[in-house]
Image: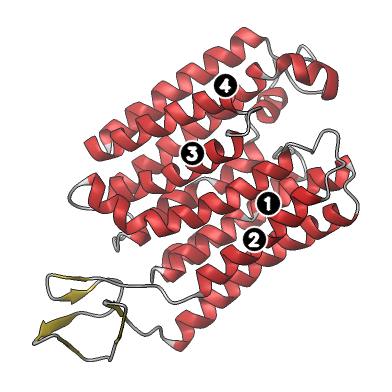
Amino acid sequence: MTARAWAELLRISALFTVPGDALAGAAAVGRRPDRSTALAMGASLCLYEAGMALNDWADRDEDAVDRPHRPIPSGRITPRAALTAAGALTAAGLALAARAGRPALGVATGLAATVWAYDLRLKHTPAGPAAMAAARGLDLLLGAAATGQGSALRAARSALPAAALLGAHTHAVTTVSRHEAQGGSTGAPLAALAAVAAVGGAVVGERPASVRGGAVVGGRPASVRGGAVVGERPASVRGGAVRPPRSAPARLLLTALTGAYLRTAARPLAHAALNPSPPLTQRAVGSGIRAMIPLQAALAARAGAAGSALAVMGLVPLARALARKVSPT
């Protein structure tokens, strides 16, 4: 068993798509990343890698036919070692989440259960893409639950829109990934392309903010007097929600990050739709996985966390460079 084989089994080039979940979750609850966010990030990394190891263990017979070069069918890693790694990484992830607090542990437990259910039972069923989308959404909620003050339910409510957008993207990419070994599907890439466009449009749309304790959440402090929002900057009221204005630099950053997301995901999907061969389908899936990084950054910027957004985008060149050596799929 070599380091290269483990790197392939654990898809280490895809690891850079994970930290942004916790940072986007922290941004969604209006908190700066802290020690609990870092613990949630560590838990996410462990649970993600557990899923990768368990995935190859569960698919070892199928991979022996379609992907004999993978670490388990090629004999470089034994099935027992892969399953042991999956169990150890799951335990480590839950232990890190427990240190971040009871709400984080609750979300992490649901995430771990979803990962194991997907790999062992749901992957090859119609519920597979939905299960994977749920896992990615829960990963963002893990960061929110760990960082946010108060109950897990309150944190989840604040972060749910961002988690839903990330889940929608994940659902689209997972649907395409079902055809990466044989290719032949034009409908899946086209549907995913439409989903990516819809997610991008939703991200750049105005973000609703709520009023709590006399403050506009997600905007600048204000007080509520006689039904009016009093503060230094005006805010509009639509449908009962207060929507604080976004500054020009913030809008520019959000637009740029959303554009990066669309560029990363859309072009390979269009190519796969025009020529649904296995290589182009695999490339579309790999690009869809890497596109999660600018999407996470855009979600953080949408919540007003420009620093977190830029930090997440700093992972893009690392992910791209490592993907040339180890495939993320």
Q: Mark 3 or mark 2, which has the lower sequence index?
A: 3
Q: Nearer the viewer, residue 159 or 15?
A: 159
Above or below, comparing residue 150 to residue 59 in the picture: below
- Mark before the other along the chain sequence, 3 or 4: 4
- For disc 3, the marked residue is 135
Residue at coordinates 64% horizontally, 60% vertically from top-left? 196
**Seen in the image, is 30 located left or right of residue 303?**
left
Q: Which mark is residue 121?
A: 4
Q: In the rendered image of this protein, does residue 51 appear above or below residue 77?
A: below
> Residue most toward the left?
226
Q: Position of residue 12 (x, y in %)?
A: 63, 36
Sequence-earlier tag: 1 or 2: 2
Pointer 1 and pointer 2: residues touching (CB < 8 Å)? yes
Mark identifier at residue 196: 2
Q: Earlier in the sequence, mark 1 or mark 4?
A: 4
Task: Pick whichever, 191 or 108, lies toward us.
Answer: 191
Which amino acid does the dot numbered 2 rest on?
A: Val
Disc 4 element: helix
Which SS class for mark 2?
Answer: helix
Where's the C terminus, which quadrant?
A: top right
Q: Amino acid at mark 3?
A: Ala
Name the residue rendered at 72%, 40% in the picture. 177
Location of residue 270 in the rendering, given as x and y in whole percent from the top left corner: 81, 60
- The quadrant where residue 307 appears: bottom left
Q: What is the distance, in whole Å, between disc 3 and disc 4 at their CAs? A: 14 Å
Q: Secondary structure at mark 3?
A: helix
Q: Is residue 275 visible?
A: yes
Whole-number angstrom distance, CA of label 1 to CA of label 3: 16 Å
How far apart are the alpha carbons under marks 4 and 2?
Answer: 27 Å
Q: SS for tag 1? A: helix
How far apart marks 1 and 4 lie (CA) works out to 24 Å
User: Residue 288: which numbered mark, if any?
Assistant: 1
